[in-house]
Image (cartoon, rainbow, N blue to C red):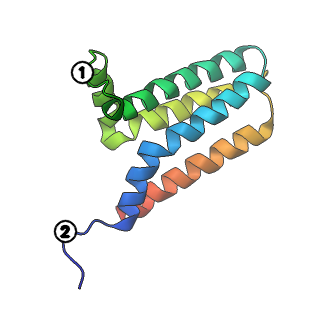
Amino acid sequence: MESAFQPDPLLMALIFAKRFIYLEVLFGLALLRLVLAKGRSRLVAGLVAALCALFILVTFAPALGLQTNEYYPPLARLLAAGQGLRVPLALSALFFVSAILPSRARRWIDVAHIALLAGFLGLWAATLG
């Protein structure tokens, strides 16, 4: 017998992905572009990597005992805004900027980013229906 209060497995997967997978993988892709690219593309990738690292720290701040710091409440609210989708999608859009700059490196990084974004948006769309 299924309980009426049991959450949908797709919704649980989306919550897990946006909290513990998406930013971490985007961080890794941004680090790869930072190391492999040149010029302005490298600068944009560095900014994305730094912001991903900041929001990963915000995600794990309670476990690390850092939630009493003054930076935590506004950044946690920002991370939760738009059902937790605004920050990951904004960082993804910023990472796309590094893909269109002429000094980008390794097209496979862009392909991996598009696959990550498509999977994330597909999971989100599956929870709507």
Question: Between 26 and 67, which is closer to the camera in this rendering?
Answer: 67
Image quadrant in which the N terminus is located: bottom left
Callout 1 environment at 10 Å: few (<14), some (14 to 19), or many (20+)? few
Q: Which residue is mark 2?
A: 5
Q: Position of residue 29 (x, y in %)?
A: 66, 35
Residue 6 left/right relative to 114: left
Q: In which image quadrant can residue 72 be found? A: top left
Disc 2 secondary structure class: loop
Q: Residue at x 35, y 40 (%)?
A: 84
Residue 24 left/right relative to 76: right
Residue 29 left/right relative to 38: left
Q: Residue at x 38, y 28 (%)?
A: 58
Report if residue 101 is visible in the image. no
Q: Residue at x 56, y 27 (%)?
A: 94
Q: Which residue is mark 1?
A: 68
* Front tag of 2 and 1: 1
